[in-house]
Amino acid sequence: MTEVTEAARMPFAVRSARFVMTLQVAFAVVNFALYGMAIIAHGLFGLAPILYFAIGVAFTVLLGLLTGRWHSRLRRVRWASVAFEIVIAGGQAAAQAIDPGISTGHLISAMLFPAVVVVILLTPAAGRWFDR
């Protein structure tokens, strides 16, 4: 008879970080769907709006792929997630520098999710989970 072994349970902190990344993907999908409709409705077919849309969709897809790979427990998935979240936070800071009309409150709220994920992924529990 074959024996069934139970898979190790993901720590709560790591599940929380994965949930936050899932929220980021969900919010980004809604955001870019609305942005795409606005581009079409207003006829803004210049290079800048289309490039912004394409980069945003690419980032959203990559974030979704990283989130989906967490069950592999590979160390490189953890560090890729940390690096990607730092890039997202840096992009938000760059957007603040380019468009000073964005409020500081908006910047803080936009950088909150990436900061939470980075802090959680740098905890020892996350390190043990991804270091199988």
Image (cartoon, grey):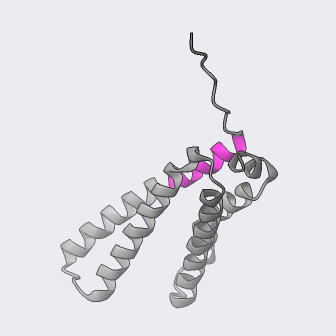
Q: Which residue sits furthest right?
A: 124
Drawn side of residue 22 relative to residue 124, left or right: left
Q: Position of residue 48 (x, y in %)?
A: 33, 87
Q: Which residues are magenta?
A: 12-23
Q: Position of residue 70 (x, y in %)?
A: 57, 49
Residue at x 52% of width, y 90% of height: 98
Q: Which residue sits furthest front?
A: 1
Residue at x 60% of width, y 64% of height: 80
Q: Position of residue 82 (x, y in %)?
A: 65, 64
Q: Is residue 113 visible?
A: no
Q: Quadrant of residue 93?
A: bottom right
Q: Quadrant of the C terminus?
A: top right
Q: Quadrant of residue 78?
A: bottom right
Magenta stretch: residue 66 in it? no
Drawn side of residue 75 relative to residue 88, left or right: right
Q: Quadrant of residue 91?
A: bottom right
- Residue 2 lies, with reference to residue 124, above or below; the image says above
- Residue 71 lies, with reference to residue 106, above or below; the image says above
Residue at x 44% of width, y 53% of height: 26
Q: Nearer the viewer, residue 55 or 27?
A: 55
Q: Nearer the viewer, residue 87 or 104?
A: 87
